[in-house]
Structures are given as structure tokens and as C-alpha cells.
Image: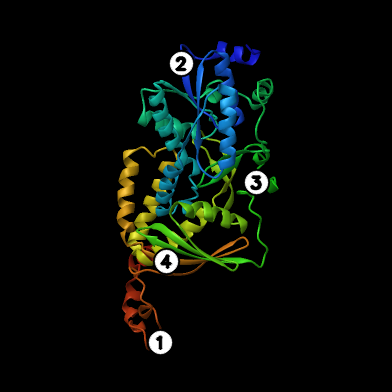
Amino acid sequence: MDQFASRLKASAGAEYQNIESAVLLYSGGLESRVVGSVLQEWGLEVYPLVLDMGGREKRMAAVEKEAKVRFGRADMRSIVPDILSAARRGIKTNCLSYGYLNAGGFSRPFMAQAAAKFAAEKNISVVIHGHSGLSDDHLRFELSMRALAPQIRTLCPVRDWDMKREESRDYDKRQKGTQSFSAPSFSIDENIWGRTAWQGDLLDPQARLPQTIGEWGGEKKRGGNESAKLTVAFANGTAENVQVTNRTKKETITGDEIVPYLNSLGASFGIGGRDIVVDKMMGPKTREYHQGPAAEILVAAHADLESICLTKKEQEMKSGIDRAWNKLVDEGGWFTRLRHQLDAFVDETQNVVDGEVNLTLETGRLLVAGRSSPHALYDARLGRSDSAGLLSSSSSRAYARLRDLQETLAYRSGMEK
């Protein structure tokens, strides 16, 4: 047994004892490779589960192939439909308006759901994942496992063993097989909804971002004078189709193809990237780069359509609900009663969010260029100041005298002291 694996076995806690077999969430990254190899050296039967989360079809095929070489078996399951379903709810709650791309919040619950189902199929009572204890993803995953399958022992060796990347790299180099794909100078988590980069070159908060960090599918960036025109059609707050005029080409994108299409198109215009500092649940602040071109486009269109369909008071109330929903999901609360309760309010508001929003994509810019809805509360005649206007300007004279009367009285009383 390798010295590294032997040392870990000697220091592992009681929860790692008496395990004959385990499901391993296998991404092909350094941590899952090392954890899998160590468990094999301990004599465990490892059942790697590769999850297709979208956006990296060729890479996931390579991961599955490598897992079969390393462990003699591998299963791949897709959770893309689940992530897209969650993303549709994210659009309804205008997720980017509150700083939450929620790529991890939308994926980890369904990673847990797939792992629990796979473990039940194989009659295995242990699930092992490779998340770091410094990330929020280990919390999102384990909260979901606890809600869905409390009978399963869920273990996180990278956290529990306090694994350091330098030691892990050295150990990995000594193992059979070679890495099937090159590793960037930063960590990446990617699914069909969004892409998050952190660690490595991003540790210095004032350093410039690596040039390769914003690539999505190798899409070539557009020239400064190019543009694309979009019309997003919504029904009950859900994007049903997008009409695209891109160069001389016109096409209509529908259903589950909308998000990957807009990710590629938006990335080519440099749209959807955010260099931000994130407050982790464990306490530290970390610098991350979030990329979600489709999210940027669809949330901008949805929020704009809401502005013409919802009343002022509905928007004010929903703004707080949106923030609460996204914070809850970001912190691992997908499988909670509260999330379902908030969904009920949001869904009720979306019954009138029907219509179309026009947008223009330019290099580095996303512009809303018009909106329409059969439920629009907008009447141009009410805001006109010419003879065609329905409201008389003089009718607001008395209102102007009474508006915020208490605030005026309070301020004046303070001046008299």
C-alpha cells in the first residue's frame, strides 16, 4: 500500500471503518481520482458514478472511459433535465439580480438525488463525494443527502482527511493510468446552467483574470461591430422560445435547447461573466469567476417583462421573496418545505408574466430593446403630457401637498429643537 494511503487509513475516523463497498461521485478531477485510488488500496469495492451535468459531452465520455480503466466499472447518469428545471425556477426568481448564479445550488441537490438512487439500485449504504471542505458544495450535497436518504452514510474524504493538493498530486502521479485531460491553472465547476472558477490564479483578488477563464465551448469572440437580435417569448414566466437574428441567419430555439444555445451565443459576445468576491457559508471570502451567458440574457428579459406585467406592490413583495428563495437555494435548501412555500407565491405571480422581450447583443453589452404583453399594465395615454393624455397634470396638485406629510412634519419638528 502506498505510504500516503496507509497514513490516511491510520488516521481515518470510525465512520470509514468496516466499509466493503461505496458509491463514488467521480468527476475525473484530482480529488475524485485520489479518493477512488485510496479506497481501492484499502480494499473497498468502488462503484464510480459519473454525472453528466451538461456542457462537456466529450469530456464526460473521457471521464467515464477513464473510470472504467481505473475501477473496472463505471455508470454515467444525466441530471441535465433536473438542472434545467431548477434553472427555470431561478429565472422566475430573477436569480442574477441578487448575485446568485446558483450553478451549484441547482446541481448539487440532483447530484445527491442521483447518488441516492444509484446506491439503492446497487444495495450500497455508503456514498462518497470529492468536494472540498472549504467550498459550499459539500454542504449543499450533504444537506440534500440527509433530506433524501438519511439511511445512507455520506462521506467527504477531502474534508475529513484534510487532503492537501500538493500531496494529492504526488500520489496521483504514482497511480496507474494517466490523466485524460489537461488541468487549467484554476478549479472549475461547470454544468449546463453556469460555470464557476476559483482557486489557483484567482486567489489574488487584484490579479487580472487568465485569458482562458471566460471560454465556453471554445466559442470565438465577436468583433466590435457585430450584433445579434433576440426576441424571448415567455408563458407563465418560462421562456418558451427565442427568435434569433444572428448575422444573416434567422432561427427559432425552443425548450431545452435555449440555455446551451444562449450560453454559446452570449459567450461569443463576452456577455455573462462576473468577477466577484463570495461570502462562503463557512465564513471566508473567496474570489470567483461566474459565467452564465444564458442566465444573464434570460433573467434580464424576464425581469423586464415583470416590470410591465406586475403591479408596483407585487414587485416590491416579490423582490424580497426572490432574494429569500435564491439565498435559500444557494445555501443548500432545495429540498425544504420553505422552498416549496416560496415557489407557491412565485408561481402565482407568474400567471400574468406572458409576452415577448426584444434584446440586442453587442460586444460586452446586453440591451433590452422593447417588450409587449397581453397582461401589460402599461397605458401610454396615462403618462402623456399632450392633449391626448387621459390624466390632467393639475389633478396631482392636491396630492403633491399631502405626499409624505408625516415625513415633512417629522423633519420640521427636529429643526425646532
The percent coordinates of residue 256 (x first, y second) are: 45, 51
Question: Which amino acid type is marked by label 4?
Answer: Glu
How far apart are the alpha carbons under marks 4 and 3?
33 Å
Q: Which mark is residue 43?
A: none
Q: Regarding mark 3 in the picture, which secondary structure is present there?
A: helix
Q: Regarding mark 2 in the picture, which secondary structure is present there?
A: helix
Question: Which amino acid type is marked by label 3?
Answer: Ile
Question: Which amino acid type is marked by label 1?
Answer: Asp
How far apart are the alpha carbons under marks 1 and 4?
29 Å
Of badges 2 and 1, the one in the foreground is 2
Q: Which mark is residue 386?
A: 1
The percent coordinates of residue 147 (x first, y second) are: 36, 31
How far apart are the alpha carbons under marks 2 and 1?
77 Å
Instruction: Quickly name the residue at label 4.
Output: 356
Of badges 1 and 4, the one in the foreground is 4
Q: Earlier in the sequence, mark 1 or mark 3?
A: 3
Q: Regarding mark 1 in the picture, which secondary structure is present there?
A: loop
Q: Earlier in the sequence, mark 2 or mark 3?
A: 2
Q: Earlier in the sequence, mark 2 or mark 1?
A: 2
Of badges 2 and 4, the one in the foreground is 4
Instruction: Quickly name the residue at label 3.
Output: 213
Q: Regarding mark 4 in the picture, which secondary structure is present there?
A: strand
Instruction: Quickly name the residue at label 2.
Output: 15
Q: Is residue 146 visible?
A: yes
Q: Earlier in the sequence, mark 1 or mark 4?
A: 4
